[in-house]
Image: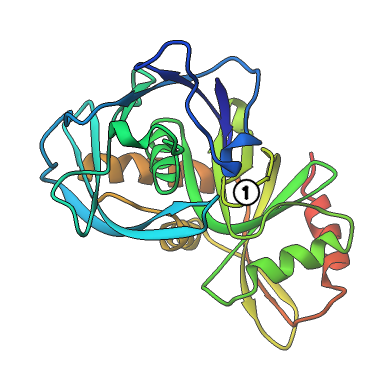
Amino acid sequence: MILDLAGFRIKLVNTSTVESLPFLNTMHQGLKCVYQPEFLLRIHYSDHQLFDRPEGSCISMQESNSDENVNTPIKVWMDFDGKRILIQGWPESSGSPCWECILEPGQKIGMIRHPAAYRNRDPLAYPVDHLILYYLSLWNQAIILHASGISFSGNGALFTGLSGAGKSTIAYRCTNAGARLIHDDRMLLRKFEKEQITGYRMPSYPGQSACSSRVTTVFAIKQERQFSIQTLSEHESLELLMQHSVQFFYHPDLLNRQYQTFQQLVKALPFYLLTLPDDPGIGHHLRKIIESHAT
């Protein structure tokens, strides 16, 4: 089974029973694909831990089952030994991890272990899928950005900003002007050869299929009474990406990888500060600006 997770083609292999494929919830069912995989992820069901609790950083997250609409608070522990990324999810009321993951992005392999009783649960249920995408991004010139994304005839744009700035609203204004919506909240931005930048829909909503577009412009948005557009400097663009990108694990080697990707992206894309009123017709004006960057 191969899934297209925000552009990363991941092959899932059940190591416990060769004939059995892992169970997927409605979030991931629509992401099956037939493309050549670029990462192998083994799914292992066992009650024996793979490793002791990591000694790196710990963050609080919500474990989600999209089919049951249930969120459970967990603590996620992470560490990096120079080659492998070790991750464990610990329920607040349990003395053992509810899942653990070993990733070797440089070798394009990984393993997830779930307890034997979890065979009928999606092994990639949030936050596992997002954590995997985050670490794969660090090795593949990509970042996850709090941003909405749209595309006018293959010319994509991202809108990022503070919470409540209107990222979703402006994306839907653009769809009224003929744009295709990629995502209204979170995008994976990936740089390929020849300076091509592609934006991918993050898996967030049940039933959505994979979606992407070439990205030609990034806008930082701010609600004002008057419309204006200002080119951001390289330094301002770097600050923008650092402020609005997803960062799960504060390890110096991994942060350096992410910063190098920031630098490459700001050299390959134009960044603008966009101030605008809440005008239902603003999408038509933005369409002209976005299409002017088509090459």
234 shown above or below 82: below
Q: Secondary structure at mark 1?
A: loop
User: Residue at 38% of width from left, 37% of height from top?
Assistant: 138
Percent x, y of residue 262: 44, 47
216 shown above or below 107: below
Q: Is residue 5 left or right of residue 34?
A: left
Q: Nearer the viewer, residue 69 or 218?
A: 69
Q: Quadrant of the C terminus?
A: top right
Q: What residue is pinned by disc 1?
A: 206
User: Residue at 62% of width from left, 38% of height from top?
Assistant: 197
User: Residue at 62% of width from left, 42% of height from top?
Assistant: 200
| Residue 162 seen from this side | yes
**Residue at the bottom extreme of this rendering:** 225
Percent x, y of residue 28: 57, 38
163 shown above or below 172: below
Give the quarter of the image for residue 108: top left
| Total numbered badges shown on the rendered structure | 1
Mark 1 residue crowding within 10 angstroms, few (<14) / some (14–19) / many (20+): some
Q: Is residue 216 left or right of residue 72?
A: right
Percent x, y of residue 64: 44, 53
What's under tag 1, amino acid-wise?
Pro
| Residue 101 seen from this side | no
Q: Nearer the viewer, residue 178 or 19?
A: 19
Q: Is residue 94 left or right of residue 235?
A: left
